[in-house]
Image: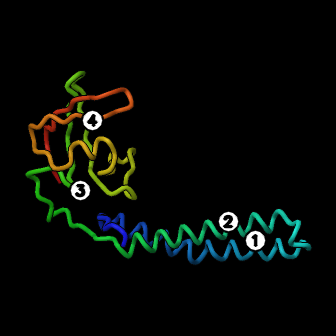
Amino acid sequence: MSEVKYFTKEGYEKLAAELQELKGKGRAEIARAIQKAREMGDLSENAEYDAAKDAQGLLELKISQLENTIATARILDDNDINLDKAYILSTVTLKNLKNGKKMKYMLVSEEEANLKEGKISIKSPVGKAVLGHEVGDIVEIDAPAGKMQFELEAISR
């Protein structure tokens, strides 16, 4: 059985919309590409046909993965989040103890992670390090540049 993944309402809706898009428009586009390739003649030496069939396989794999993710998804309401410790959907403020710089991240599932939006996965090095910690705790993060220490300054919604 697949592991349960937690999502914000908007993250879940985005996944569901992507699934519908792939099932509708995505499948229709692949079907057209396969039909067009068939019309080119001998399928045994038809690179376009092989490419279209490969694309169809990848599309069906992506659909299957999304269906599995949605089937095991749980939507979290950020009002239910306990702010005593850093958990999924918490927004954490970290202070780099070496240079004093502050960073603010929302802890989310892997599927919702987007660094540009300040959302990091709970499975990322930073996410793993802060998960379950309280304000004032010093956390050590394994980064490519080596171990770094941060103070967990704040936890919010």
- 90 above or below 31? above
Q: Secondary structure at mark 4?
A: strand
Which label's residue is closer to the chain start, 4 or 2? Answer: 2
Residue 88 got which mark? Answer: 3
Which label's residue is closer to the chain start, 1 or 2? Answer: 1
Disc 3 crowd, CA 10 A, few/some/many (<14, 14-19, 20+): many
What's the residue at 38%, 70% (across, down)? 13
Question: What is the x, y in percent for residue 24?
Answer: 58, 78
Disc 4 crowd, CA 10 A, few/some/many (<14, 14-19, 20+): some
Residue extending furthest toward the right: 41
Residue extending furthest toward the front: 1
The kind of residue tagged 4 is: Ile
How far, Cα to Cα, is label 1 from label 2?
Answer: 9 Å
Q: Which residue carries the number 1 mark?
A: 33
How far, Cα to Cα, is label 4 from label 2?
Answer: 39 Å
Would you say the residues marked 1 and 2 are in contact, meaning their CB atoms lie under 8 Å apart?
A: yes
How far, Cα to Cα, is label 4 from label 1?
Answer: 47 Å
Would you say the residues marked 4 and 2 are in contact, meaning their CB atoms lie under 8 Å apart?
A: no
Residue 141 got which mark? Answer: 4
What's the residue at 68%, 72% (across, down)? 29
- 51 above or below 125? below
Q: Which residue carries the number 2 mark?
A: 55
